[in-house]
Image (cartoon, helix red, strand yellow):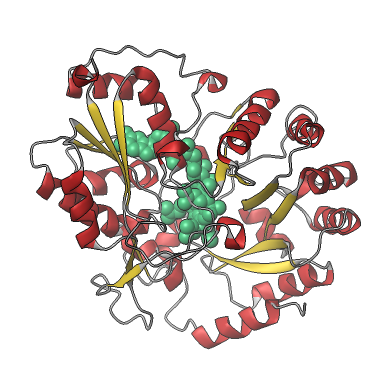
Amino acid sequence: MTADRPHILLVNPWIDDFAAYDVWAQPLGLLMLAGLLRRQGYRLSYLDCLDRFHPRAPRSEPFARQGRGPYIKTPQPAPAGLEDIQRRYSRYGIRTAWLHDDLSRQAPPDLILVTSMMTYWYPGVQATIAVLRQTYPAVPILLGGIYATLCREHAERTSGADHVIPGAMDARLLETISSLTGYGARATIDLDDVNAYPYPAWDLRRLINYVPILTSLGCPFDCAYCASQFLQPRCRRRHPQAVIEEILFWHKTSGVRDFVIYDDAFLMQPDAHAGPILEGLIRSGARLRFHTPNALHIRGIDRPMARLLARAGFHTLRLGLETTVRNKQETYDHKVNLNEFVSAAGNLREAGFTPQTVGAYLLIGLPGQPMDAVVESIRLVKNQGIQPILAYYTPIPHTQLWPEAVAASRYDLEADPVFSNNAIFPCQPESFSWERLSALKKITRIAA
Ligand code: B12
């Protein structure tokens, strides 16, 4: 019976970078797609090149650091043009030999789907595709995800995939998959209805130590440095009850305690969305912990919201402050002003949050931004009892700031996405000082 159902292999590729760490990073898009394809009737396998719990990997404690942890890494030569950077470049993820062995044990697939994340991680995507191609020369390989969407032409030219499919999953994608596999499954759900999506197929992971949650898609803001509106042009919210059910489902079936909010705008219209979700979770009595590494909007954190967040078990809070320097903020970011930050910080303190668990992102490395511009912001954030966290700017195609970033950069950003790596501060001038950066990092520290 199952033999006539096509077999699809889903692959989360390696990361090539100067640094990478699992900060609750999972390929949510790929596993959402997996959930949908399973519902369509396909047989699935999953190969996670970033698997920290691979049987041949050194033992890693899955629940320490609430699920976060280091990837295995293998030193690599830095890409052309970045040889002078005084930092070690590595391939993050399982060893190449393990990947070959795992693939050789795998039933041959009819189709391979590879995802992608950061644009400048594409060398890891290329290397993964090369191994897949070597093992299964005749199997079509589809590449999608964030790099494929933001740098479509580059991916078409260089990735080695047979098809590059930009954008979110839609009916056309299902048609493509159906025509490539010869399996005539029509969409079984309305893809416009976010409440109808099956749960992401987290059960394909070797171990579920935390679960990312998306309660809404898209972002109503249009910040100059961010690509969210290009990646997800439509804002759509899931029904609060559906979100509560999903969280409790993973908690009950897999014992998961740590949940990670991936939304761009979780606190928008809180009375209709975050409020009911948090209240429902509190009512459930489940002992849960939430983390928001993708940042919450400060404006949404009034007194009742701060209390709700605390009671629902929000643990690691990140706030999207970006920069408190007033004129810069107006230029780059529509999200927040200073009074709102001070008030949100007060509300969080009152609700029991401490600098150990609450941090505010400050964007650094923007085109034309002198390093020292953030000193004032760091001070202000610390004075509010909140940990400043320097977030290094990465230039992203299709954002408002891209042309300015291209003009300001000491690299040819348009020629090669590898130059967009935020670790090299691509938009700072030649005179950029690593010592100054270290000094800035030092002043962010708050004594415990
Ligand atoms: C959640 C998130 C994170 C998470 C981790 C996510 C992860 N998986 O690793 C956290 C908070 C840790 C994070 C961190 C960072 N992030 Co981030 N993040 C996001 C965010 C908000 C959502 C990504 C997501 O999961 N979306 C939901 C899923 C459902 O969508 P999706 O992955 O695109 O998948 C869909 C399609 O692409 C498609 N698809 C996916 N795979 C495939 C495969 C095939 C074959 C096909 C056909 C289709 C397909 O179908 C899916 C369903 O529709 C995006 C912005 C955004 N709105 O997309 C930024 C974004 C990806 N992040 C960005 C940045 C800059 C960062 C940081 C560098 C920030 C910083 N300065 O520190 C860090 C570094 C990350 C790291 N790991 O080292 C940038 C990317 C920049 C770049 N150059 O590529 C983005 C675009 C935001 C922005 N500023 O514009 N991030």
Label count reads 0
Quadrant of the drawing holding the C terminus:
bottom right
As drawn, 424 above or below 363 = below
Residue 76 against residue 284 in the figure, above or below: below
385 vs 64, left or right, is right
Q: Judge from the rendering whether residue 265 lies leftward or rightward of residue 89; answer left or right.
A: right
Q: Residue furthest bottom?
A: 435
User: Quick one: quadrant of the N terminus?
Assistant: top left
Residue at the image position 30 percent from the left and 55 percent from the top: 122
- Along the line of sight, which residue is nearer the eye, 439 or 240? 240
Question: Percent position (x, y) of residue 221?
Answer: 63, 41
Question: Where is residue 208 shown, x and y percent of the image?
Answer: 50, 46
Q: Spot the residue most to the left.
A: 138
Q: Is 189 located above or below residue 173 in the figure? A: above
Task: From the top left corner, tell me how far across and down residue 81 is, in percent.
Answer: 26, 73
Picture quarter containing residue 358? bottom right
Q: In the image, is 209 to the left or to the right of 183?
A: right
Residue 296 at least partly seen: no
- Residue 347, compared with residue 72, is above or below; it is above
| Viewer-nearest residue: 421 or 98 | 98
Residue shown at 54%/65% (left/top)?
A: 366
User: For residue 161, what is the image quadrant?
Assistant: top left
Q: Nearer the viewer, residue 144 or 299?
A: 144
Q: Is residue 146 visible?
A: yes
